[in-house]
Amino acid sequence: MEFTAKSGNPEKQRTACIVVGVFEPRRLSPAAERLDQVSDGFISNLIRRGDLEGKIGLTLLLHSVPNTLCDRILLIGCGRERELHDAQYRKIMATTASTLNDIGAMEAVCYLTELHVKGRDNHWNIRQAVETMEDSLYSFDQLKSKKDATRRPLRKIVLSVASRRELQDSDAAVSEGDAIAQGVKFAKDLGNLPGNICTPSYLAEQALELAKQFDSITTEILDQAEMEELGMGALLSVAKGSRQAPKLICMTHNGNGKSKPIVLVGKGLTFDAGGISLKPAAAMDEMKYDMCGGASVFGVMKAVAQLNLPLNIIGVVPSSENMPDGAANKPGDIVTSMSGQTIEILNTDAEGRLILCDALTYSEKYDPEVVIDIATLTGACVVALGKHASGLLSNHSPLAHDLLNAGRSSGDRAWELPLWEEYQEQLKSPFADMANIGGRDAGTITAACFLSSFTKKYNWAHLDIAGSAWRSGEKKSATGRPVPLLTQYLLDRCKEK
Ligand code: BES
Ligand code: MN
Ligand code: ZN
């Protein structure tokens, strides 16, 4: 989809469709009011008859409105004006995109970006409009042999801006929104691909492809032999039960000469059967999503390359399957990680931390400014926070603070859990330096505690995206989160400088 920002009067737009808002109860937005005036009350007449009360999510399509240059006007219910918050705005934008797509208007001028959203500005409105519309038009049909193609799909949307003065900033907002949307789409596609297609080798190929597409990106892939050389005993132990070769995928976006890089480490378990501690059958297919942390790193790399951000950013994705097999890890096995610390594997299903810990130690070589890992790490995080927030744990409170803020402003929120020393107790092992599980209590925290033993040398944050990375049920799909949060964090870092 192509987005542009523009300012101008609605009655002067020569377009297939104009989109304006109606608030509850039966109150016209300024743009709707203007169209009503030029058409001698055409819209207010309909509204008075009760055709659209302004309820959020409801729509009314008008044809041949007098004294306008457009083919149609689409009225969108916006709810109560005073209750127009982030969530309502996103709902309105999603309704707009899907309705436009359904009615066969291939292009439109949307005035809803001029509405006032509580605590937000024009820049936010424009960017969210782009992201939300792209998100709601997404579908994953690559693997359907017959695609139900929309006859006249939506191609171009002009987003209206109240004054010319805001145009330059609006163009920047469109570019940011577009880059984030592309990153989100990339992460969703990788997430939705099944485990038999999206293997560690497939992910490695995608990383090489990114380096081909963008001059700022270089990719390096470490194979099993190279990882053995580095002593990555924890990571490699997870791959032992799989026929798929593990990969350590390293992508570098070089945007700022010699400055210290920000390193993103994403869990890339292309399928997590649990290993010998086999998972139950129900919904096990969803464990193809266990590489969504890695996918979000791919998505962010794409977004920052597209935006050409003046930062050095490194994406590290340790990738493997976790399968039951005669050669697989067994409960009680003790492995030596790259850091030299030994780990007793009490449950082979707690494999994410095993591949991450070696990738985190490996990240030391980049002399990082900060390291952020992203992982579908614990079912406990879904119990604690549900699907609305990602779990955040960190050894550096300014970093946690920045990430929480980035979550709030991007609408891709995280919530902090404590990383107190006291929880470490739960990981004690009689035979090794630590166990890989910490019992039933505080599962998300003990998983992060485990990782914290490998991140002592730098400022680090961990995002547990077990609840936020995908949706189950009828609309099962990867969400592309937390690409918006992470890209926002990086955009904020650029402004700091
Ligand atoms: N990938 C899973 C976590 C997960 C489970 C995410 C369900 C989303 C939905 C992870 O590898 C795992 O299996 N974790 C175990 C850890 C436990 C054995 C300590 C879990 O959460 O049950
Ligand atoms: Mn697991
Ligand atoms: Zn897992």
Image (tube, grey):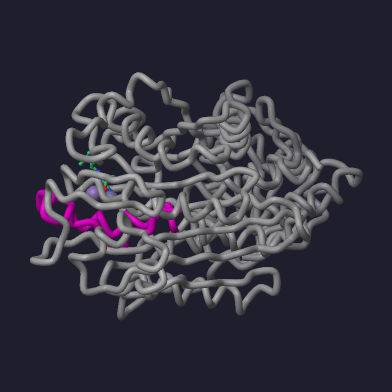
Is residue 98 in sight in this rendering?
Answer: no
Q: Is 297 situated left or right of 302 in this image?
A: left
Instruction: Give percent across and percent down for residue 434.
Output: 27, 37
Residue stretch rendered in magenta on the structure? 266-294
Outermost right residue: 165
Is residue 120 in sight in this rendering?
Answer: yes
Instruction: Give percent across and percent down for residue 134.
Output: 55, 57
Q: Measured along the vertical axis of the image, is residue 215 above or below residue 276?
A: below
Q: Measured along the vertical axis of the image, is residue 398 above or below residue 281?
A: above
Q: Quadrant of residue 369?
A: top right
Q: Please name the residue shown 32% across and 27% down the image.
A: 384
Q: Is 370 situated left or right of 136 in this image?
A: right
Q: Is 428 situated left or right of 223 in this image?
A: left
Q: Please name the residue shown 43% across and 42% down the image.
A: 454
Q: Nearer the viewer, residue 23 or 359?
A: 359
Q: Is residue 280 magenta?
A: yes
How many labels, in total? 0
Q: Nearer the viewer, residue 467 or 221?
A: 221
Quadrant of the drawing holding the N terminus: bottom right
Q: Nearer the viewer, residue 90 or 426?
A: 426
Q: Is residue 199 magenta?
A: no
Q: Nearer the viewer, residue 418 or 304?
A: 418
Q: Is 280 situated left or right of 298 in this image?
A: left
Instruction: Give percent across and percent down for residue 463.
Output: 45, 40
